[in-house]
Image (spheres, rainbow, N blue to C red):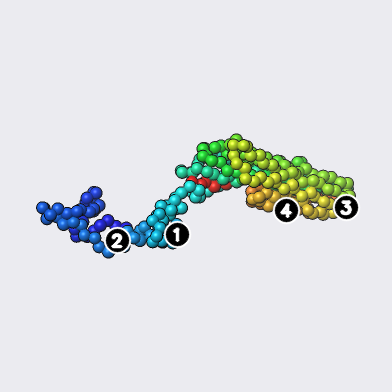
Amino acid sequence: MHRIDTSTAQVDKFGLGKNGFTGGNPQTGVLPTALDADYFDTLQEELAGVIEAAGLTLNKANNSQLQAAIKALVGPGRLLNVQIIKATGIYTPYLGTKTIIVEMVSAGGASGGVPASSSSANFASGGGGGGGYAKFLISNPVATSVTVGAGGVGTSGGTGATGGSTSFGSYANITGGSGSSYGQANGGALIALGGSGGTATVAASAQSILTINGTVGFPAIMINGGSGANHFGGSSVFGVGGIGSGNGSGGSGIGYGAGGGGSMRGTNNTGTSANGASGSGGIVIVWEYA
């Protein structure tokens, strides 16, 4: 766009380089400002561009299209920003934010570590539990403390650690997936249960949209002291449970809020102990709207 620049424009009327219009003065010989097609084309295309940018079709019979376009482009409800929070701290709303939608998961639990097997004893642990999930809306948000749970850590020869809770102020809290313990059998079959999934609680001060419990870790199943299977870690909305091992330590949780895969030592695979696998940490995602 440009200001009027015809030869009869009033130069610097609104400041240096800011020309304006004049009606002229016959007594002093000042001519009124002349208008040209270039100036009117500029005005037309500037205004039409705003209307079309809002997805509207120009309509000669509608004199409120510019107003409708501005409301559509800068009115309430549009997405302003997204904050992804992976560590404990303070959430500060983006400038102009009126509403937020928060999605978050707690951390996954670890699987239990197993002792070294022998010719007469075998050990296995189920997968750690997956983290829970919550989605909720808050109007007129303010600075809020955020806790992001750390993944449960796998241990040596014991119960895996429970994943940390994730919370958003007093609005919501999700417990972490629990760790699993190991089972023992003297040369025979065994089943070792996985850890339970995390659960979410949303306070009445927020509008709950959706809550999902974390998946229970898969149990370890071993037959006749040999290798086993089916002891994946529990999954979350944002993560996949680690793979269980048939002989050794399982895999860590993948993504966010996933449980560690179970570990195993059978009488057919005697040797050293195997640590449990760690779960993955939680995450908070804040969608900020005008």
- The front one of 110 and 9 is 9
Name the residue carrying label 1. 56
Outermost residue toward the left in this view: 27
Element marked by disc 3: loop
Farthest residue to the bottom: give it.
37
Element on which disc 1 rests = loop
CA gap, disc 1 to disc 4? 52 Å
In the rendered view, would you say 139 is above or below 234?
A: above
Spot occupied by residue 84 in the image (x, y as percentages of width and height): 55, 47
Q: Residue 40 carries which label?
A: 2
Q: Can residue 98 be seen from the camera position used here?
A: yes
Q: Which mark is residue 224?
A: 3
Mark 2 to mark 4 CA distance (whole Å): 68 Å
Q: Closer to the camera, 53 or 222?
A: 53
Which quadrant is home to the N terminus?
bottom left
Q: Residue at x 72, y 48 (%)?
A: 215
Q: Earlier in the sequence, mark 2 or mark 4?
A: 2
**Which three-letter amino acid code belongs to the residue tagged 2?**
Phe
Residue designated by label 4: 243
Q: Name the residue: 52% across, 46% down.
A: 288
- Whether residues under marks 2 and 1 lie with C-beta atoms below 8 angstroms apart, the answer is no
Along the line of sight, the residue nearer the viewer: 200 or 14? 14
Question: Which element carries disc 4, helix, strand or loop?
Answer: loop
